Amino acid sequence: MNAVAGSKNTRLARLGPWMGIAFFVLFVAGFIVFPSPKDNNNARQWERLWLDSGHRTGAVIGAYLMVLGVLAFIWFAWSLRERLGQGAGLMFTFGSVFAAIAMVSALVRASIPGGKLFGDVPVPAGAFSRQFDGIGFGLLLVAGSLAAGMFVGVASYLARGSGALPGWVTGAGYVVAVLQLAGSFFFPFVLFPLWVLIASIVLVRRGSTLLDIKETVGTASGATASTAPSG
């Protein structure tokens, strides 16, 4: 029974690198689709932005794309834990914290246009709309960046030790992890989904060697247990 469950987990984990690629595509697309005024400091432009139905729809679509991307990232982080084995639980915890913060960030940013679109809630003053967007970005670029940095740092350390990723990817991961301390400047944070994309592509090209070994060992252990004398 354990061998069968392990085999199913291995098949799901093989999709992990593709989920990492999906995270990059969906998350970046959500950022691009999500509208913002030309002058971010102009409160009147913020108010006019959400009075436009097209912009409200774009914001909701952008939030959905970002949430879907984060769900794909959770799958990627889980599959990486399966590859790295012992000690990877801490990495998955940091990845889950990032995912939770990113979801809350997207929903906070989309709360005003979503409220108007689905509940016909009046659009508040422009300054209030600007503050809500700022809160969403602050969550992502401060707390989210720190959690993302810890995820990349631990993942790079474990992957270097196990050989799951080449040295240049793990070395770049250390740099990305440190730069997340300055994630509030936005550009350092952009390096995080880019690292996930590169790591995912490398894992796809490398195939599932580690997972195949785990599946073989698990199957052999299960067969040995089933054939052992009962008593």
Image (spheres, rainbow, N blue to C red):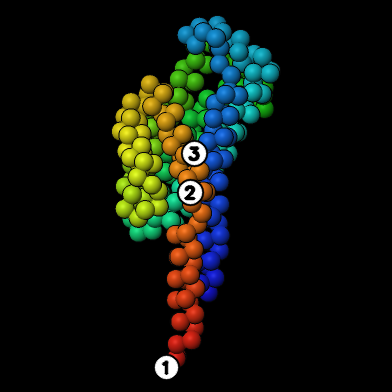
Residue 193 showing in the rendered view:
yes
Query: Which residue is drawn at the image coordinates 38% and 21% (left, top)?
Result: 185
How dense is the environment of label 3, judged by Cα within 10 Å: few (below 14), some, or many (20 and up)? Answer: many
> In the rendered image, which quarter is residue 184 located in?
top left
Q: Secondary structure at mark 3?
A: helix
Residue 37 drawn above or below residue 18: above
Residue 96 point in image, percent of width and height = 43, 44
> In the rendered image, which quarter is residue 94 located in?
top left
Residue 207 point in image, percent of width and height = 51, 54
Residue 36 drawn above or below residue 26: above
Residue 45 point in image, percent of width and height = 56, 8
Query: Which residue is drawn at the image coordinates 38% and 27% (left, top)?
Result: 188
Residue 100 showing in the rendered view:
no
Q: Secondary structure at mark 1?
A: loop
Q: Is residue 96 left or right of residue 19?
A: left
The label nearer to you, 2 versus 1, is 2
> In the rendered image, which quarter is residue 64 located in?
top right
Residue 171 point in image, percent of width and height = 33, 40
- Mark identifier at residue 203: 2
The residues tagged by marks 3 and 2 sit, at their Cα atoms, a distance apart of: 10 Å
What residue would you read off at disc 1?
A: 231
Looking at numbered disc 3 in the image, what kind of residue is underneath it? Leu
Contact between marks 1 and 3 (CB within 8 A): the answer is no
Q: Earlier in the sequence, mark 1 or mark 3?
A: 3
**Which quadrant of the rendered structure holds the C terminus?**
bottom left
Contact between marks 3 and 2 (CB within 8 A): the answer is no
The residues tagged by marks 1 and 3 sit, at their Cα atoms, a distance apart of: 52 Å
Looking at numbered disc 1 in the image, what kind of residue is underneath it? Gly
- Mark identifier at residue 197: 3
